[in-house]
Image (spheres, rainbow, N blue to C red):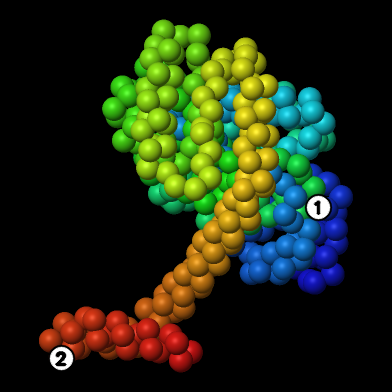
Amino acid sequence: MAGPDLDELVARAREGQPRAVARLISLVEDSSPRVADIARALTPYTGRARVAGLTGPPGVGKSTSTSALLTALRGEGLRVGVLAIDPSSPFSGGALLGDRIRMTEHATDPGVFIRSMATRGHLGGLSWATPQAVRVLDAAGFDVVLIETVGVGQSEVDVVKLADTTVVLLAPGMGDGIQAAKAGVLEIADVFVVNKADRDGADATVHDLKQMITLARRELRGPSWRQPIVRTVAAKGEGVDEVVSALRTHYEWLVAHGELDRRRAARAREEVAAIALRRLHAELADLRDGDRLGDLAARVAARELDPFTAADRLIAELKGS
């Protein structure tokens, strides 16, 4: 793609044209050689969107909740982008579940953009390309970006590295309070949502969460946010306005306490490190395909060289390249 073509694509995406937005996300998801150019072109137009992550165990109703949130946010006149992070197909690497199917009522709304993205084997529940996709939606003028993760349990904590606000969804009957308190995803929550709150056990789930929050606050120092617990029945739209209110209140708290800048700086740090590691890995792969790594490995196998010294020499060659 030539420079002028990319400039035109970026301009059309900033005008909110869905095809241009989709094309840019496809380029970053497919690891196009122009990803760096895309990031450079988009970065000056970012920083406006509020980014909220929705995570939690499978079966709690994340997609239904995301759809209900979409309806509520659109009711306030906000433009909303959704990244539904799906498990990868073992054959194509593409998104497998296709959460967009569950949000068909929003398909014709020009103020909504929904995209399923594959995790491509990433343990933390997010594709490496997700930060770039968030950047595309931010630059395209979406007011809110919702990231819905796959629901893989305790490893699903990467969303906190991307979101301004992290929403953890639970449902009655998903395990006892002690197990819930141990789950890593509960430690990252800014807002708790107990969905399917019309079921038996909802009161017990809320009680366990309140106890956990009280215990956690004893360890905190400085300005602390007390996570609200919102009951919803997303399938009926009940309690969703309260979730939107909690998201807004948390964002205002982030701004008032300087936490928004801190989180976004941490997000940038993670992104830069991930890009640097990815590039180093690519360079290492080039060396692996060449003769140098084979020579070093042969010397280690012959006990002429220890593996740490061999690794140091390989790194030294990377630094000198």
The x, y position of residue 177, in whole percent, is 32, 24
Mark 1 element type: helix
Mark 2 nearby-residue class (10 Å; few <14, some 14–19, many ≥20): few
Mark 1 nearby-residue class (10 Å; few <14, some 14–19, many ≥20): many
Residue at horizontal 40%, vertical 18%?
Answer: 207
The answer to whether residue 131 of the structure is visible from this angle is no
Residue at horizontal 57%, vertical 28%?
Answer: 63
The answer to whether residue 1 of the structure is visible from this angle is yes
| Vertical comparison of 115 with 307: above or below | above
The x, y position of residue 53, in whole percent, is 57, 40
Judge left or right: residue 263 versus residue 176. Answer: right
The x, y position of residue 263, in whole percent, is 57, 53
Q: Which mark is residue 276?
A: none
Residue at horizontal 53%, vertical 28%?
Answer: 228
Q: Amino acid at mark 1?
A: Ala
Which image quadrant is residue 34 in? bottom right
The x, y position of residue 73, in whole percent, is 73, 29
Q: Amino acid at mark 2?
A: Glu
Position of the N terminus by quadrant = bottom right
Q: Which mark is residue 304?
A: 2
- Image marks 2 and 1: residues in contact by CB distance under 8 Å: no
Return the residue nearer the eye: 183 or 251. Answer: 251
Return the residue nearer the eye: 205 or 156. Answer: 205
Nearest to N terminus: mark 2 or mark 1? 1
Residue at horizontal 62%, vertical 37%?
Answer: 250
Return the residue nearer the eye: 231 or 14. Answer: 231
Q: Which mark is residue 13?
A: 1
Return the residue nearer the eye: 40 or 20. Answer: 40
Judge left or right: residue 294 versus residue 107. Answer: left
